[in-house]
Amino acid sequence: MNGKRVFITGGASGLGRALAERYARDGARICIGDVNDQRGSETLQALRAAGVETHYLHCDVTQEADLDNAAQWMQTHWGGVDIVVNNAGVAASGGITELSLADWQWIVDINVLGVVRGCKAFAPLLKKQKSGHIVNVASMAGLIHPPLMSAYNATKAAVVALSETLKVELADDNIGVSVVCPAFFRTNLTETARAGDADSSRMMNKLVTKARRGADEIAALVHDGIERGDFHILTHKREARIWRLKRLLPYPMFSRMMLKATRQMMGKAAQRARDGS
């Protein structure tokens, strides 16, 4: 790993920063892209204090030019790239009647087209090198689809589909592809999250803030999965088992199981609300 060149979108906080710090311990050269320049500067200083060669770029994944500029910077200054992590993403919750179309367009532009822009910007460079690895951060929500999160589910499922396509499409160019599908973990995702109603907002906040695992632990699992060359990088065993069950069972049976579990979950949530907890 010593000397490998890594580019990470959304690299100034959350999982992106945790991945940067994990690769720093390997001695990799790390370029982080983010829209939050203050956090970018803080992350840059922390990585440099650890003795890592690193660089920060202002990178808005809704802007194709920003990702093209990132690919060009990597080519010009470091002679190419070894690992591209399309990590930047946002969350939205709410039922189909509550979440606005504007919120749908917002999340699609970042979660889906942001990853597409990253892949399009770096694929020519990786093809020219005949080497490299694309890592797209999706979610377990892209594999199993909980209620009241249709927009988030749909965008993450699209990232999974894109990744499956690129794994085959880029194989002859010796380019690896991985898709990361974590369940909820503690991160700053809720800072920018949108919700169609107060109940779904509270649900989202609880799922993130009360999660058992933090970004550092998830980053370590993702790092190891990339090193093994895993395609699906599944960081949560329980949710991974549910996904495998979904693949094995007839869908009507799985759907009934999910409906029962959802009713139980919503009932418990309603009881907690009545109790004021």
Image (cartoon, rainbow, N blue to C red):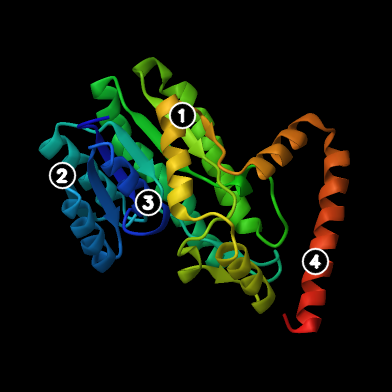
The residue that label 3 is drawn on is: 18
Q: In this view, does 218 lie to the left or right of 210?
A: left
Of tags 1 and 3, the one toward the viewer is 3
The residue that label 4 is drawn on is: 266
Is tag 4's residue or tag 3's residue first in the polypeptide sequence?
3
Q: What secondary structure is marked by label 2?
A: loop
Q: What secondary structure is marked by label 1?
A: helix
Q: Nearer the viewer, residue 168 or 221?
A: 221
* Residue 100 seen by the camera: no
- The answer to which image quadrant residue 134 occupies is top left
Q: Residue 254: x, y in percent? A: 83, 41
174 shown above or below 139: above
The residue that label 2 is drawn on is: 53
Circle 2 Cα neighbour tier, 10 Å, few/some/many (<14 / 14–19 / ≥20): some
Q: Do the residues labelled 4 and 3 touch (CB within 8 Å)?
A: no
Q: In this view, does 74 lie to the left or right of 157?
A: left
- The answer to which image quadrant residue 206 occupies is bottom right
Residue appearing at x 87%, y 54% in the figure: 260
Q: Residue 25: x, y in percent? A: 28, 41
Q: Residue 78: x, y in percent? A: 14, 36
Q: What secondary structure is marked by label 3?
A: helix
Is tag 2's residue or tag 3's residue first in the polypeptide sequence?
3
